[in-house]
Amino acid sequence: MARTVSSFSVTADGKGDYLLNFEDEDGETLELTASYEQLDLISEAISEALDADEDDALGVDDDADEEIDE
């Protein structure tokens, strides 16, 4: 079962990679190392997912932009 993220951080390790730390609601942690390229791909994937869900998250009604004939 998927765990819920409670907090996370991304820090440069000083050697060209990045350290990703995730903590879940139970306090369990996961630490990963990623290259700049990998972090860039993660960033793009997050942006695409958020863009796809933006209207739903903001409560935008697709019909609100249509003209109403009176």
Image: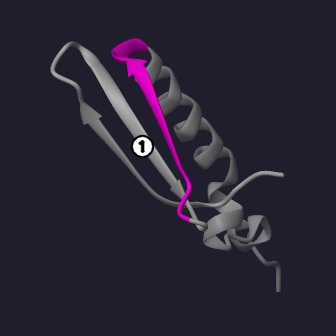
Residue 58 among magenta residues: no
Name the residue type under label 1.
Asn
Using the image as rendered, state which of residue 9 and residue 37 is in the foreground. Answer: 9
- What kind of secondary structure does the magenta stretch mostly adopt? strand
**Depth check: 20 or 56 in front?**
20
Classify residue 12 as left or right of residue 46.
left
What are the residue bounds of the magenta stretch?
27-37
Q: In the figure, residue 67 lies in which quadrant?
A: bottom right
- Up-down relation of residue 6 to residue 45 (above or below): below
**Which quarter of the picture shows residue 48?**
top right
Percent of width and height locating residue 55: 66, 61
Please identify the residue farthest to the bottom as the structure is shown.
Answer: 70
Residue at left 79%, top 69%?
63
Name the side, left or right, on which 67 lies relative to 8.
right
The residue to which callout 1 is attached is: 21
Q: Out of 53 and 39, give the one closest to the viewer.
A: 39
Name the residue nearer the viewer: 36 or 6.
6
Instruction: Measuring from the top left, give residue 61's x and y in whole percent.
Output: 74, 71
- Is residue 6 depicted above or below 8 in this figure? below
Q: Who's the residue at 47% across and 30% down the image? A: 32
Horizontal and vertical percent position of residue 42: 51, 28
Give SS at disc 1: strand
Q: Position of residue 70 (x, y in %)?
A: 82, 86
